[in-house]
């Protein structure tokens, strides 16, 4: 079956995101745009995922637990998990590696939402690099049922090609994300990326930028497990 997806959306937890991008507004917009599956991937935290799951359940919208991790090299990498529980465990692990408190006046709010109400803010600066090197991510998240997908690889900031110059040949991920597919031929000049599959998501920092029903994943069933299997095979 083909599922319309957007697997890279930010919520009000991300400091660079619009404060109106609450979990309920994200889910509402995804339903309005007739998406089948989404992933909210905030920077270095998963603390809004419980509210995303709560809101999505009413509409039958499939949610893949995710995070946009910033590595020690400042490479952005999407990390997806089979369960909300394991995503939250990873979130706690990542927080222990963050070193800079957030300054709201400079970097903006990082709202945590529960029951459609702002209940607090993340105190560490989520837009900073974590202490997790790129070459350790696979081994950290695999025991948690996780799958890694380097984000927006074509970008001149925080894409793996710009930050590291190349993809290490001992990498083990099987899918990469590209936002602007016009750069796909250039990206595939990298020896590691040349034969891999890719996904295209919005990286939306405002609900209006969430993708329309334009990108599809072909999977056996509508489940988190099937999505992750697609990404890692």
Image: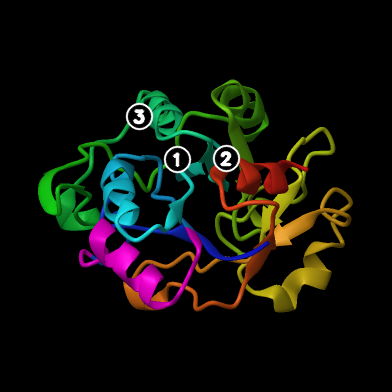
Q: Say left or right for 27 vs 157.
A: left
Tell me, for residue 209, which label it has, or none: none
Q: CA distance from mark 1 to mark 3?
A: 11 Å
Residue 39 seen from this side: no
In the image shown, does 116 or 163 lie closer to the viewer? 116
Q: CA distance from mark 3 to mark 2?
A: 16 Å
Q: Quadrant of residue 27?
A: bottom left
Q: Badges 1 and 3: C-beta atoms under 8 Å apart?
A: no
Q: Position of residue 134 (x, y in %)?
A: 63, 35
Q: Say left or right for 195 vs 211.
A: right
In the image shown, does 200 or 34 lie closer to the viewer? 34
Say which residue appears at 33% left-offset and 44% top-offset: 49
Say which residue appears at 41% left-offset and 76% top-offset: 209
Part of the protein shown in magenta: 19-37
**Element type at mark 2:** loop
Q: CA distance from mark 2 to mark 1?
A: 7 Å
Q: Which residue is mark 3?
A: 95
Q: Which residue is mark 2?
A: 73
Q: Residues within 10 Å of mark 1 (few under 14, many from 20)?
A: many
**Element type at mark 1:** loop
Q: Earlier in the sequence, mark 1 or mark 3?
A: 3
In the image, is residue 193 part of the stretch drawn in magenta? no
The quarter of the image holding the C terminus is top right
Q: Earlier in the sequence, mark 2 or mark 1?
A: 2
Say which residue appears at 49% left-offset and 74% top-offset: 211
Q: Badges 2 and 1: C-beta atoms under 8 Å apart?
A: yes
Q: Which residue is mark 1?
A: 129
In the image shown, does 180 or 197 lie closer to the viewer? 197
Q: Position of residue 194 (x, y in %)?
A: 87, 57
Looking at the image, is 25 positioned above or below residue 53?
below
In this rendering, the label closer to the viewer, 3 or 2: 3
Q: Earlier in the sequence, mark 3 or mark 2?
A: 2
């Amino acid at each position: 079956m083909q599922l319309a997806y957007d697997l890279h959306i930010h919520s009000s937890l991300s400091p660079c995101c619009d404060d109106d991008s609450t979990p309920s507004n994200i889910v509402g917009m995804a339903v309005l745009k007739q998406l089948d599956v989404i992933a909210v991937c905030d920077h270095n935290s998963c603390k809004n995922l419980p509210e995303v799951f709560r809101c999505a359940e009413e509409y039958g919208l499939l949610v893949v637990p995710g995070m946009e991790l910033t590595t020690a090299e400042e490479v952005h990498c999407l990390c997806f998990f089979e369960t909300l529980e394991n995503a939250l465990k990873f979130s706690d692990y990542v927080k222990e590696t963050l070193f800079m408190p957030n300054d709201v006046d400079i970097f903006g709010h990082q709202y945590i939402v529960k029951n459609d109400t702002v209940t607090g803010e993340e105190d560490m600066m989520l837009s900073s690099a974590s202490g997790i090197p790129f070459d350790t991510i696979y081994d950290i998240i695999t025991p948690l049922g996780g799958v890694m997908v380097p984000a927006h690889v074509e970008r001149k900031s925080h894409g793996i090609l710009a930050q590291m110059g190349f993809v290490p040949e001992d990498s083990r991920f099987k899918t990469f994300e590209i936002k602007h597919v016009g750069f796909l031929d250039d990206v595939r000049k990298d020896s590691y990326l040349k034969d891999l599959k890719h996904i295209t998501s919005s990286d939306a920092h405002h609900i209006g930028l969430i993708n329309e029903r334009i990108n599809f994943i072909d999977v056996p069933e509508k489940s988190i497990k099937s999505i992750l299997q697609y990404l890692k095979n």
